[in-house]
Image (tube, rainbow, N blue to C red):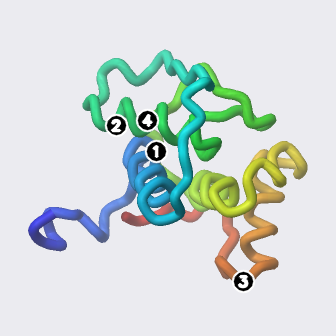
């Protein structure tokens, strides 16, 4: 974006936007490659812009988002859902640690947030905290 105002840096982020951000980071900065053999088809993405549809698929094929608690592709992506610390922490944990913390806590996000906290990556692990762009 040409300016911070256009980038909406103080606005909340939704899942489809996070998918684009984290996928671009994973590919362009960390050199990760999506597994295109994984079939990620979501029943709620048809009304989304094409770039966000592709981002959801890519995030799923990278093993970051659009997955169930066991790490398998989910049926729905929930593209307009506001991103909470639980959602962000889970995606970021999967980026750093792979599937190590999937389905290992009492909630789907517990082990992901705990790992990020233990490693000093995040200090606030309040799952309902709203993330900003």
Label 4 SS:
loop
Task: Please tell me which of labels 1 and 2 falls first in the chain.
Answer: 1
Q: Tell me residue 131's x, y (percent).
A: 48, 63
Label 3 SS:
loop
Q: Tell me residue 19's x, y (percent).
A: 46, 46
CB atoms of marks 1 and 2 within 8 Å: no
Q: Tell me residue 109's x, y (percent).
A: 74, 52
Residue 52 numbered tag: 2
CB atoms of marks 1 and 3 within 8 Å: no
Q: Tell me residue 36's x, y (percent).
A: 55, 29
Given this view, does label 1 or label 2 mark the residue nearer the observer? Answer: 2
Name the residue at 45% across, 60% down.
25
Residue 120 numbered tag: 3
**Around disc 4, counting alpha carbons within 10 Å, would you say few (fewer than 14), some (14 to 19), or many (20 or more)?**
many
Give the CA distance from mark 2 to mark 4. 8 Å
Left or right of 68: which side holds 83? left
Name the residue at 57% across, 57% down.
88
**Around disc 2, counting alpha carbons within 10 Å, would you say few (fewer than 14), some (14 to 19), or many (20 or more)?**
some
Name the residue at 47% across, 54% down.
27
CB atoms of marks 2 and 4 within 8 Å: yes
Task: Please tell me which of labels 2 and 4 falls first in the chain.
Answer: 2
Task: Please tell me which of labels 1 and 3 falls first in the chain.
Answer: 1
Which residue in the structure is indicated by mark 1?
Answer: 15
Give the CA distance from mark 1 to mark 3. 24 Å
Which residue in the structure is indicated by mark 4?
Answer: 79
Where does the C terminus fall, quadrant-wise?
bottom left
**Viewer-side residue, 27 vs 93:** 27
């Amino acid at each position: 974006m040409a300016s911070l105002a256009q980038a909406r840096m103080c606005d909340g982020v939704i899942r489809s936007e996070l998918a684009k951000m984290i996928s671009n980071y994973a590919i362009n900065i960390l050199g990760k490659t999506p597994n295109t053999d994984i079939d990620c088809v979501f029943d709620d993405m048809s009304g989304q812009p094409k770039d966000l549809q592709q981002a959801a698929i890519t995030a799923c094929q990278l093993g970051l988002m659009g997955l169930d608690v066991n790490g398998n592709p989910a049926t729905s992506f929930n593209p307009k859902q506001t991103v909470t610390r639980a959602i962000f922490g889970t995606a970021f944990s999967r980026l750093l640690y792979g599937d190590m913390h999937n389905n290992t806590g009492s909630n789907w996000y517990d082990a992901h947030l705990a790992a990020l906290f233990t490693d000093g990556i995040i200090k606030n692990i309040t799952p309902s905290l709203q993330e900003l762009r």
